[in-house]
């Protein structure tokens, strides 16, 4: 059994090494593709205008401030507003966990008694102004003991341009209610001391009542901002792995046309044993591709002035998702080779299928900027499963546990494609 397997591996390595043009396509072209696509998309990643980005909102205030912010976010085209998770009202902890897991890109928390804090702050400001001879001096010395801190949880996948737009909208919503509260409080307080006094002191605008606290909901130390490098290196690495469908399917079809497959079937061996040589060789090819692509992001792209690829902290998670992706890509290539009857058919069918799966899987355009219907469709692409896992490891500081579901999906995809290939091969053999 082992001798047969080693012989199959040796045969596949000899066939692969003889095709130098095919080796160039497998190793050199993906590296060039990463260079080109990263340089092209670098500015686009900085300036793209996202809409409908999912936001989770927690209103602990239950008063004017929280209601106005909720209404403003709900009616804004900029975001997709949510205030519950799995049918339950969101809380600070569940919101942070949901953002950290990538379910939402931004979480906004309005604290308890925020509206009352603004009222007390303004009332204190008015009292000190009306009871002081040195108005301007006292205004500068006022301590904002009742200042409001609105917490914003941020998924590292969120680009800075979108975050700026969200915080700007949030400040606009809050400034409306702040102004209303301030003027009403000024009017009520001043009317007690100065009847028929219509004007309000201009000094109140100098006090900063609303504060913002931006927290990256991730285990990664520091702020890992997604950019063209963080997206393109893993995305095009996955694409290159699945693109082995061309040489793999081509070699299988060529063997069938030349009669090699028929001679192999005359041997007392199962289809899976005969195909294991291809699987082993092309999984190794995929792993070599990953190492080369990783070196591009870590070494060569920084030489061009682009950011260095951040790979996170879970090396075991990277190894697991890389190996499972390699098996999924190899299984896909074997299935395409078993289905195809000519080399041209295998090349066209395989390449078009990979292009389609990569497009809906988020390789060309990140899924978080796609319409909702496309985000739902992308969940069926194996390239999306792998890319989401690399996002989880590289950007969100995830580990083995967080990428396990996607790794299981990739293994099941490999088993499914191998089963289909085995059935098709058996049917063609008996026909």
Image (spheres, helix red, strand yellow):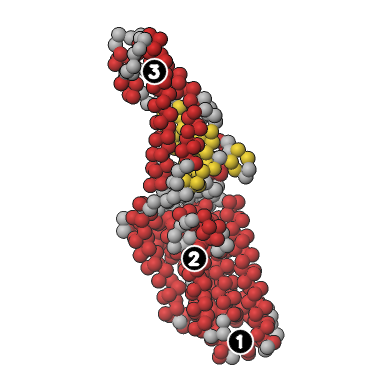
Q: CA distance from mark 2 to mark 3?
A: 59 Å
Residue 87, x across and y down, in percent:
63, 43
| Residue placed most toward the observer, 380 or 65 | 65
Residue 188, x across and y down, in percent:
42, 15
- The residue located at (50%, 32%) in the rendering is 66
Residue 379, x across and y down, in percent:
56, 59
Residue 290, x across and y down, in percent:
48, 64
**Residue that mark 2 sits on:** 358
Q: Is residue 11 visible?
A: no
- Residue 327 vertical placement versus 337 (above, below): above
Q: Is residue 67 left or right of residue 276?
A: left
**Residue that mark 1 sits on:** 261
Q: CA distance from mark 1 to mark 2?
A: 31 Å
Label 1 crowding class (10 Å Cα cut-off): few <14, some 14-19, many 20+?
some
Q: Is residue 324 visible?
A: yes
**Residue that mark 3 sits on:** 186
- The residue located at (40%, 10%) in the rendering is 192
Say what secondary structure mark 3 lies in.
Answer: helix
Q: Is residue 278 left or right of residue 114?
A: right
| Residue placed most toward the observer, 67 or 103 | 67
């Amino acid at each position: 059994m082992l001798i047969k397997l080693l012989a199959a591996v040796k045969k596949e390595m000899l066939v692969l090494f003889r095709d130098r043009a095919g080796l160039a396509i497998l190793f050199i072209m993906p590296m060039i593709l990463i260079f080109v696509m990263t340089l092209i998309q670098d500015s686009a990643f900085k300036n793209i205008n996202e809409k409908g980005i999912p936001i989770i909102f927690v209103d602990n205030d239950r008063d004017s401030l929280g209601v106005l912010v909720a209404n403003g976010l709900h009616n804004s085209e900029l975001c997709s507003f949510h205030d519950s998770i799995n049918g339950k009202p969101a809380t600070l902890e569940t919101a942070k966990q949901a953002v950290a897991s990538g379910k939402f890109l931004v979480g906004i928390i309005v604290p308890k008694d925020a509206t009352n804090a603004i009222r007390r702050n303004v009332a204190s400001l008015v009292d000190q102004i009306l009871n002081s001879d040195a108005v301007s001096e006292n205004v500068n010395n006022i301590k904002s003991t009742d200042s409001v801190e609105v917490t914003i949880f941020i998924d590292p996948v969120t680009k800075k341009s979108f975050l700026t737009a969200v915080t700007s909208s949030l400040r606009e919503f809050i400034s409306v209610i702040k102004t209303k509260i301030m003027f009403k409080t000024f009017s009520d307080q001043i009317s007690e001391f100065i009847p028929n006094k219509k004007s309000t002191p201009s000094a109140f605008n100098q006090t900063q009542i609303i504060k913002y606290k931006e927290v990256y909901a991730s285990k990664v130390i520091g702020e890992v901002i997604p950019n063209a490098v963080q997206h393109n290196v893993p995305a095009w690495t996955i694409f290159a792995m699945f693109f082995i469908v061309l040489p793999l399917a081509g070699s299988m079809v060529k063997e069938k046309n030349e009669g090699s497959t028929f001679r192999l079937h005359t041997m007392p061996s199962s289809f899976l044993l005969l195909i294991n040589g291809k699987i082993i060789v092309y999984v190794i090819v995929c792993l070599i591709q990953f190492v080369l692509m990783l070196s591009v992001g870590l070494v060569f792209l920084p030489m061009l002035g682009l950011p260095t690829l951040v790979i996170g902290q879970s090396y075991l998670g990277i190894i697991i998702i890389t190996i499972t992706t390699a098996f999924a890509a190899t299984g896909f290539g074997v299935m395409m080779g078993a289905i195809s009857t000519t080399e041209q058919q295998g090349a066209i069918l395989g390449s078009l299928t990979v292009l389609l799966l990569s497009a809906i899987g988020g390789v060309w355009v990140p899924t978080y900027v796609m319409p909702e219907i496309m985000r739902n469709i992308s969940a069926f692409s194996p390239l999306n499963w792998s890319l989401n896992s690399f996002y989880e490891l590289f950007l969100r500081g995830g580990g083995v546990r967080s990428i396990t579901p996607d790794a299981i999906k990739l293994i099941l995809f490999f088993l499914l494609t191998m089963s289909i290939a085995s059935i098709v091969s058996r049917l063609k053999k008996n026909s």
